[in-house]
Amino acid sequence: MTAALPQSAPPSSLDQAYAACRTIARREAKNFYYAFRALTRERRDGICAIYAFMRQADDLADDESISRDQRRRNLEAWLAEWRSVCKGGSSANPAFVAAYDATQRFQIPLKLLEELVDGVSMDLDRAASGDPDTYATFSELYRYCYLVASVVGLVSIRIFGYSDPIAEQLAEETGIAFQLTNILRDVPEDAARNRVYLAVEDLKAQSLTVGALLHRLPKAPPNPAERALLAEYARRAENYYQSAQTLIPLIHRESRPALWVLVTIYHALLKRIEAADYDVFSRRASVPTVQKMAILMVGMARMAWARAFG
């Protein structure tokens, strides 16, 4: 499908917009960018455009140098400009120009990008200043994970290509696996920002409190209750990773290596957390660059094979 460009954006501007998005993704995307490299150029540009759009929204919502009210106003103004682009208006924002083109090229519902913005703005709307950001139940946390991660998956599979509708449910659950992995890795960093992304009902089940998690001794290893809680979240994430494995064969042959790279890197991160006996406090869990490069090399070889013999 030929992309419909914003009215005042000539092709050279579109090329420049995609180039700017590639730069943002290369600088910021980390684990995601390794997977981007295993895509064909057109699909990689589409993913980079969506990533740049998402990065801008996230940065606006997360800028703690200004008040929540000001962040909300900034995000609303940014969203208003995006909606204007979707109606044919022009913009100097390369993420808007490229992301809109990607939505047309890959038939991505604009509603999904609106949901991405809903996800990053949730923290601005939920808690009063000074109160910790929490979720009462796992169902509430699931909704947050859906908006900030599953929606990314639902956008991505449209760029990757698929035909079986079940891929959409599997992409949702893959996003949950990724976000639960992020939550486990980032427990101490989130606590330092007055955030607890472990449901209060799950804390209570282990006789833990939000306050105890927020004010624990820095770098102290997890106590038995904390370890049990983190292990339970890891178990849930492992269950959702099964959906990721089922999803990979349903994706367009040329795109499967990219999804495989992403799933493999994220799952390796969860495995490192498990291997550390859930001690995410003493040292931040990460997948070594050499391991990620090895995974990428396998993914690139698989892509070359798919293009040569697909």
Image (cartoon, rainbow, N blue to C red):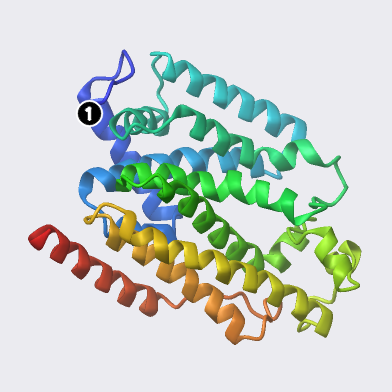
Which quadrant would the C terminus be assigned to in this image?
A: bottom left
Which quadrant would the N terminus be assigned to in this image?
A: top left
Work out whether residue 59 can be spotted.
yes
Identify the residue position indicated by label 1 in the image: 1
Residue 291 is left or right of residue 173, and the answer is left
Vertical position of residue 188 compared to residue 108: above or below = below
Work out whether residue 67 can be spotted.
no
Judge the density around disc 1: few (<14), some (14-19), many (≥20) Cα neighbours within 10 Å: few
Residue 285 is left or right of residue 71, and the answer is left
Give coordinates of residue 40: x percent, y percent. Answer: 21, 51
Give coordinates of residue 81: x percent, y percent. Answer: 51, 20
Vertical position of residue 233 compared to residue 282: above or below = above
Q: Quadrant of residue 217?
A: bottom right
Give coordinates of residue 86: x percent, y percent. Answer: 43, 19
**Of residues 267 and 167, the one drawn nearer to the viewer in this rendering:** 167
**Residue at 21% in and 48% down:** 41
**Residue at 47% in and 16% down:** 84
Give coordinates of residue 117: x percent, y percent. Answer: 58, 35
Q: Count up the numbered dots.
A: 1
**Which type of secondary structure does the marked residue at label 1 adopt?**
loop
Amino acid type of the residue that numbered disc 1 sits on in the rendered structure: Met
Vertical position of residue 17 compared to residue 252: above or below = above
**Residue at 79% in and 75% down:** 218
Q: In which quarter of the image is residue 303?
A: bottom left
